[in-house]
Amino acid sequence: MPLVTYPSPVVPGPPPLTIEMPDTWEQVWAPETLFAIREPERTDGSFLTNIVARHYHRGGDFGPEKAVADLKADAEAKGGELGQTFETEIDGTTFFGAATSIVDENAGTIVQVHLFAAQPQGSVLAVIQLTGSCAGARAGTEVDLIRSIMKTLRINP
């Protein structure tokens, strides 16, 4: 009988990733992520600025248009909106990006920066998605911090 393995050419696994985080931040476990990093607990209990990385597979029709449509629908369902879209290069990989805002009853408006890179693997596209989130009065400065941290991502280091 043939042996099926994971990862395989049909169902490839995620690539190794590295990212540089600020000295005061910590890595934490978060469901369905490759990694999650965040600022340390705050005494005021406010929303913690964070970045998570996910890996998933999509069919060959997945691309920026589909990612934008999904982000827009999610943001609008949460009382927010889709903001600016852009492209950026990180370590030789082109990422499609978009900013969104969502409304949380506890944190208020949460601003998110999303980056997507897709690469063919067998008959599917392997997608790396980075999402950085921040909220409240600090969001204006924290978005720049999130973007600078995301720029340190390395795939297959």
Image: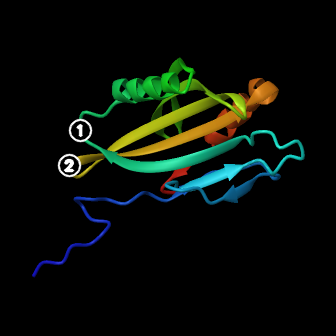
- Per the image, label 1 sits on a secondary structure element best described as loop
Write the residue at 45% across / 45% down. 128
N-term mark: 1 or 2: 1
**Residue 115 drawn at (x, y percent):** 51, 35
Pointer 1 and pointer 2: residues touching (CB < 8 Å)? yes
**Residue 45 drawn at (x, y percent):** 83, 43
Can you see residue 20?
no
- In the image, taking residue 109 as reference, residue 128 lies left or right, namely left
Residue 33 higher or lower than 7, as above or below: above
User: Disc number at residue 133?
Assistant: none
Classed neighbour count for the residue bearing mark 2: other residues with Cα under 10 Å, few (<14), some (14–19), many (≥20): few
Write the residue at 32% across / 66% down. 7
- Residue type at mark 2 is Ser
Write the residue at 75% across / 39% down. 47
User: Disc number at residue 60?
Assistant: 1
Which residue sits furthest left? 1
Marks 1 and 2, Cα distance to the nearest angstrom?
Answer: 8 Å
- In the image, taking residue 154 as reference, residue 149 lies left or right, namely right
User: Disc number at residue 123?
Assistant: 2
- In the image, taking residue 23 as reference, residue 151 lies left or right, namely left
- In the image, taking residue 65 as reference, residue 83 lies left or right, namely right
Residue 61 higher or lower than 156, as above or below: above
Give the position of the N terminus as an image quadrant: bottom left
- Residue type at mark 1 is Gly
**Residue 43 drawn at (x, y percent):** 90, 47
